[in-house]
Image (cartoon, rainbow, N blue to C red):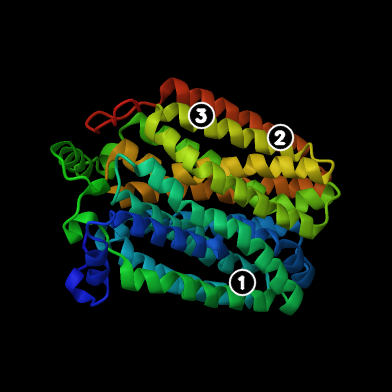
């Protein structure tokens, strides 16, 4: 990977020097990664959720067809992620994120001009690839390069940016739609993406601690240097593909990516059908986000201290409870209970997103492995909304579909507990096997 040169910027080296002997610069990287996670909001399903009905009305496209456009576009975007992973390994997360951030803003404006089904599908593809795919993958990669022993906690703090996005982007989108319409709303979101994402990447970011003479976790001991060397010498993508763990984790991410997306994408539609107002349904994202903020450090600590396969299984079970819980909502208090459960789900999901791949395969070829793993998650995200969209349009109820998906998720959790082990040749943090 090509590292950034500290001497290339007059600002970045001074910032590192200013933090020396005060705190580990990796925590600055965590904050920046949280900001980029927040900026991925226009490419996330919870933002699309408040646009589904206005787009359907304006373009005369059914929920099923919107879900189909979303699915086809997301599926197409998914198969570009392995290539993005290779570029990430080659150029580093900083340069990659700067390019992706610029393109994400452009994609927002392109989407806001959509005039038909095909245009909508291409816009979905650009937003999903740049936002939910590339931005999130690069952000997690950046944090992974700076932390090992405290990676779970660092990832959980990074995920607070996702929580803030979940709290802010849906009501912001709803407000912009009411004031200026859904098309202008996307122009505003694109400009905000540039303003939020690009300055800290250009001025403050480094790819690795080694670039500025630091070590993983900010610890300079024989043990930490040994751990860093073992992680840096992690598996290649072909080696990872020969392990059972790789396919189990891809399955987990396929399931998680798909079922969390279902709830983000159709939350407003499902809950309005169950008697809530659209504004109330959108406001529940804020409740989930607050819950996520509270639960995130707990999830991170669990990943750092408990056997990883048990924490993954717990995350799957909690998401299954959210899928069932939304089918039981009959009042606003019940919706709040669902939103809290969903917030906990997102806390675990966002921590897992960046934690699992370096934990099981090391850092050396992390981008390539992340790219393939994330592809499975995005494929899941593209396919899972289809049966739910069909149920909304044709069956007038989503309960049966969502409860079936919940049962599948619990079955996957059992498989993870029984079969997931760390591949040979990868260092296992003490107590986490």
Label pair 1/2, CB-CB below 8 angstroms: no
- The answer to whether any part of residue 377 appears in the image is yes
The quadrant holding residue 134 is bottom left
Residue at mark 1 to residue at mark 3: CA–CA distance: 39 Å
Nearest to viewer (mark 1 / mark 2): 2
- Which sits earlier in the primary sequence, circle 1 or circle 3? 1
Question: For mark 3, does the 10 Å Cα neighbourhood hold few (<14), some (14 to 19), or many (20 or more) residues?
Answer: many
The reply to whether callout 2 and callout 3 are in contact (CB within 8 Å) is no
Residue under the image location 60 percent in, 72 percent down: 111
Give the residue pinned by disc 1: 119
Q: Identify the residue at image location x=41%, y=47%.
A: 155
Q: Which mark is residue 324?
A: 2
Q: Tell me the element at label 2.
A: helix
Q: Earlier in the sequence, mark 2 or mark 3?
A: 3
Residue at left 48%, top 32%? Answer: 312
Q: CA distance from mark 1 to mark 2?
A: 34 Å
Packing grade of label 2 (10 A; few <14, some 14-19, many >=20) is many
């Amino acid at each position: 990977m090509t590292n950034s040169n500290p001497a290339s910027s007059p600002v970045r080296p001074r910032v590192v020097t200013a933090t020396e002997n005060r705190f580990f610069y990796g925590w600055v990287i965590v904050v920046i990664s949280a900001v980029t996670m927040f900026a991925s909001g226009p490419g996330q399903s919870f933002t699309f959720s408040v646009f589904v009905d206005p787009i359907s009305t304006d373009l005369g496209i059914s929920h099923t067809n919107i879900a189909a456009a979303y699915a086809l576009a997301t599926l197409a975007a998914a198969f570009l992620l392995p290539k993005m992973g290779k570029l990430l390994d080659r150029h580093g997360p900083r340069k990659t994120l700067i390019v992706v951030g610029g393109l994400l803003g452009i994609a927002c404006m392109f989407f806001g001009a959509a005039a038909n089904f095909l245009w909508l599908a291409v816009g979905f593809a650009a937003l999903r690839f740049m936002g939910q795919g590339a931005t999130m993958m690069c952000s997690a990669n950046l944090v992974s390069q700076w932390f090992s022993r405290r990676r779970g906690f660092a990832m959980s703090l990074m995920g607070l940016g996702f929580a803030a996005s979940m709290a802010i982007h849906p009501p912001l989108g709803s407000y912009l739609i009411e004031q200026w319409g859904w098309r202008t709303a996307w122009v505003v979101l694109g400009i905000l993406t540039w303003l939020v994402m690009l300055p800290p990447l250009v001025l403050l970011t480094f790819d690795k601690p080694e670039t500025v003479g630091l070590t993983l976790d900010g610890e300079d001991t024989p043990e930490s240097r040994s751990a860093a060397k073992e992680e840096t010498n992690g598996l290649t993508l072909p080696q990872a593909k020969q392990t059972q763990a790789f396919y189990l984790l891809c399955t987990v991410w396929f399931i998680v990516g798909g079922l969390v997306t279902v709830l983000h994408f159709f939350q407003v539609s499902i809950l309005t059908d169950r008697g809530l107002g659209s504004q109330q349904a959108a406001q529940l994202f804020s409740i989930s986000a607050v819950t996520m903020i509270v639960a995130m450090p707990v999830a991170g600590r669990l990943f750092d201290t408990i056997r990883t396969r048990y924490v993954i299984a717990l995350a799957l079970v909690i998401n299954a409870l959210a899928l069932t819980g939304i089918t039981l909502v009959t009042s606003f208090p019940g919706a709040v209970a669902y939103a809290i459960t969903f917030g906990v789900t997102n806390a675990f999901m966002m921590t897992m997103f960046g934690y699992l791949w370096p934990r099981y395969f090391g850092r050396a070829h992390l981008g390539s492995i992340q790219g393939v793993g994330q592809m499975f998650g995005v494929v899941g995200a593209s396919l899972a909304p289809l049966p739910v969209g069909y149920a909304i349009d044709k069956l007038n109820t989503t309960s049966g579909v969502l409860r079936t998906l919940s049962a599948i998720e619990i079955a996957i959790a059992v498989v993870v507990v029984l079969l997931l082990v760390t591949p040979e040749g990868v260092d296992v943090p003490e107590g986490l096997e």
